[in-house]
Image (tube, grey):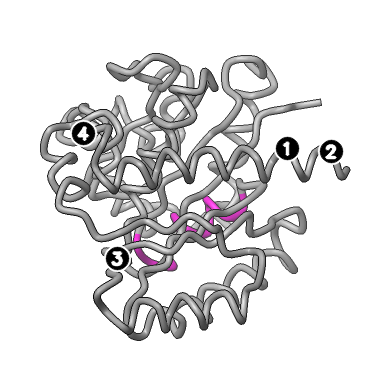
Amino acid sequence: MNKTEILSIINQKGGVGKTTTAINLAAGLAIKNKKILVIDLDPQGNATTGLGLSNSESSEETIYAVLNGTKKIPDVIKKTQFQNLDLVSSNVDLSGLEVETAGDNRRAFILKEQIMAYLNDFSDNYEYVLIDCPPSLSLLTVMALVSSHSLVVPLQTEFFALEGLTQLMKTIERIKVNLNSELKIKGILLTMYDKRNKLSSQVEKEARDYFKEKVYNTIIPRNVRLSEAPSHGVPVIVYDKSCPGSKSYFKFTDEFLSKKETFESAA
């Protein structure tokens, strides 16, 4: 039985802290001695650069080569500078995949089949595969949803955030019914929280009222260090361990793991 959990960080809206959450959760888990593979599924390649690698190298070395059938996952895994944390990188060529695979009626399953083939051969390599999704409800996002056991949804505490989430929930429900009955939402992470702003606490209240215990207790604040870290090619928890953003992501990593243990002991 495969013990690796495949987890997507997803929100079809851009600028909600999705990639920031993906790389800091990955780094937080790696620091806790969990072995992590991040798959950057966003053509912008921000998770790639945020972990210190280049998003402008040959497409033959990226997830694009796996999805177009020219490479397998083991061929494109790269070591990052962080122990226990590896990456399958992305670049802008990935944005052409939707058109290129238009004639393939099983294209939604390509990523899942490749991940499963890899994990069948190397099941002990990673405890988590974390997929950073693009900010859209495109084919790439559908591929991630079909491949995943569970989802973490970053939700910015700003106006219209919950409307966008409703649309995402409908998509997730459709995927569950038609393509991946196992899929579950692990949790919703409130991001970009500004305690001086009344709207932030209002959105938090609405989210907790509606989604109940699905919303993590940890809240990620607005923090200048969070936006600086990617340009240095490191997660914020490495860039500045003691800033509010880092403290929140360390706390989130702990909560993420403790929820997993709770589920496992209840199973």
Residue 142 drawn in magenta: yes
Spot occupied by residue 8 in the image (x, y as percentages of width and height) = 52, 49
In the picture, the quarter occupied by the N terminus is top right
**Badge 3 density bin: few <14, some 14–19, many ≥20, Cα 10 Å:** few
Q: Amino acid at mark 4?
A: Asp
Real-space Cα distance between discs 3 and 1? 31 Å
Residue 18 drawn in magenta: no
Real-space Cα distance between discs 1 and 2? 6 Å
Type of secondary structure dominating the magenta stretch = helix
N-term-proximal mark, 3 vs 4: 3
Residue under the point 17% across and 50% down: 227
Spot occupied by residue 41 in the image (x, y as percentages of width and height) = 38, 46
Compared to residue 177, the image places residue 263 above or below, namely: above
User: Closer to the camera, 264 or 1?
Assistant: 264
The residue tagged 4 is 240
- What residue span does the magenta drawing correspond to? 135-146
Residue under the point 13% across and 44% down: 228
Q: Could you say which disc has been placed on residue 153 in the image?
A: none
The residue tagged 2 is 265
Query: Do labels 4 and 1 touch, CB within 8 Å?
Result: no
Is 44 positioned to the left or the right of 182 in the image? left
Real-space Cα distance between discs 2 and 4? 34 Å
User: Closer to the camera, 206 or 137?
Assistant: 206
The residue tagged 1 is 261
Q: Amino acid at mark 3?
A: Gly
